[in-house]
Amino acid sequence: MADLMEKIVSLSKRRGFVFPSSEIYGGFGSCYDFGPLGVEMKNNIKKVWWDEMLKKQNDIVGFDAAILMSPKVWKASGHLTAGFADELVECKKCHKRFRLDEIKKPSGCPDCGGALTKPKKFNLMMKTFVGPVEDEAAATYLRAETCQGIYTNFKNVLQSMRMKIPFGIAQIGKAFRNEITPKDFIYRTREFEQMEMQWFCEPKTGPKLFDYWKKQRINWYLNLGISKKNLRAKEVPKNELPHYAKRAIDIEYRFPFGWQEIEGIHNRGDWDLSNHSKHSGEDLKYEGYFPYIIETSVGVDRSLFAFLCDAYTEVKGGRTKTTKSAKELEVLLKLDKSLAPIKAAVLPLVKNKAEIVKKAKQVYQILKPHFMTQYDEVGSIGRRYRRLDEIGCVFAITIDFDSLKNDDVTVRDRNTMKQKRVKIKDLIECLRKQL
Ligand code: ATP
């Protein structure tokens, strides 16, 4: 399994999904950049989630709050107190720092066996200064979760959109946590993106709605092709609940390094609205009560990683018949077509025949405004298929000698490798139907 991790990291770099940040300067602690294919895939994940929330579900509106907020928000939310801190221990010998809850035997350093310091609380909020003077009056924090901007705007949304309880607010945006031990590629980083939906409801309906959202969210992953055996929901024990939660489940994915959370579902009770009322002096009640909040919160980067792991398939013995040795493996990225970064690639069968190249370039121009399309004329056709399979490109469209006579192309399906001839004039419609 560790092997799979290496393969995903290597594929991500080689084919333009994910690069280490500031690489030419030796990298920068656990920060990553998304390459041309990575950004497409990320955008696709966000679009599918947004459509799920705003088009498929009822009574949800969108939102986009500022990353920087008044520090008063973070005081009210409990993030500046012990509530949002991990316990940190340091090795007295090698000075490495660890999260206490991640060490199996907290008696010695996992790296060198040295003695550990007593645990101390380490707040995860990232401090920054707003304006030209770096003093405490100018200090604020990069948001550690996107949802606080939603709670502080509860009234604004309620009134401007004439919403009635129950309803939801969805938001996608960056969040920052000064994680003690960022690790496992893009699984745990200090800067990441969240997709969060806050569902405001009557307190007594909370438990039922919690179950509803749990089911919806699990189905979302299954419908996007995540295999059932790699997905599970884990009830968070009472003594491990986040400071704001009455109940929580983690949706976990079986990563190459074990089962780990990709999404949290929380019943936040009236923690947020009542605390913001208390601290701001603004009455955030609705019809005399504080609505409960059921939250679904998923990391874009983490889910992208899970989608990559789940889609990664190796086919023994030469699927595309270009593999020299029968033992060689071919890689197929079976991403759901809605998530695949490239939907179609246009390939002239040969590159030394001017009419074929010309026609292929015309077809590319026809498809490009409608689908994320690549043009590729380098290497044998089999090699090009292999490259496309490796990035999960859904359709490979080849222009051959017959295309010149018949004004048609062959369309090859990534998963089945079946090919069919389609008239160029019908191509957009044909792809659209299948995508
Ligand atoms: P963990 O226990 O892994 O630290 P958490 O329980 O603190 O996560 P939540 O606060 O519930 O996480 O955040 C919701 C989601 O945001 C997580 O399920 C995850 O997908 C994403 N997320 C949280 N922290 C990080 C991080 N450091 N890097 C990448 N994604 C993150």
Image: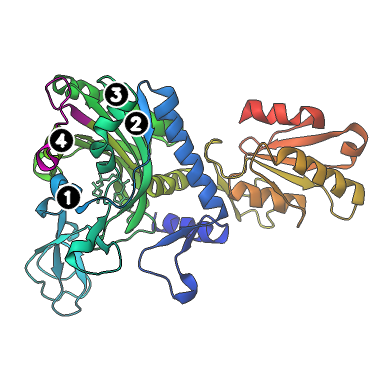
Which residue is denoted by mark 2 in the rendering?
217
Identify the amino acid type marked 1.
Lys
Tell which circle, 1 or 3, labels the residue nearer the N-terminal end.
1
Tell which circle, 2 or 4, labels the residue nearer the N-terminal end.
2
- The residue sitting at the bottom extreme is 93
Q: How crowded is mark 2: few (under 14 residues within 10 Å), some or many (20 or more)?
A: many
Give the label, 2 or 4, closer to the camera.
Answer: 4
Residue 429 colored magenta?
Answer: no
Could you tell me what secondary structure mostly forms the magenta stretch? loop
Give how far across and how far down residue 220 sits, in percent.
40, 31
Q: How crowded is mark 1: few (under 14 residues within 10 Å), some or many (20 or more)?
A: few
Give how far across and how far down residue 261 sits, in percent.
29, 45
- Using the numbered discs, state the Cα–Cα distance from disc 2 to disc 4 in whole angstroms: 33 Å
Which residue is denoted by mark 3 in the rendering?
167
Say whether mark 3 is within 8 Å of ligand 1: no
> Looking at the image, which residue is at 6% across and 68% down?
118
> Looking at the image, which residue is at 76% across and 50% down?
381
Identify the amino acid type marked 4.
Glu
Examine the rendered structure and indicate whether residue 174 appears above or below residue 432. below
Tell which circle, 2 or 1, labels the residue nearer the N-terminal end.
1
Tell which circle, 3 or 4, labels the residue nearer the N-terminal end.
3
Residue 72: mark? 1
- Using the numbered discs, state the Cα–Cα distance from disc 1 to disc 3 in whole angstroms: 26 Å
In the displayed structure, does residue 418 sit left or right of residue 170? Answer: right
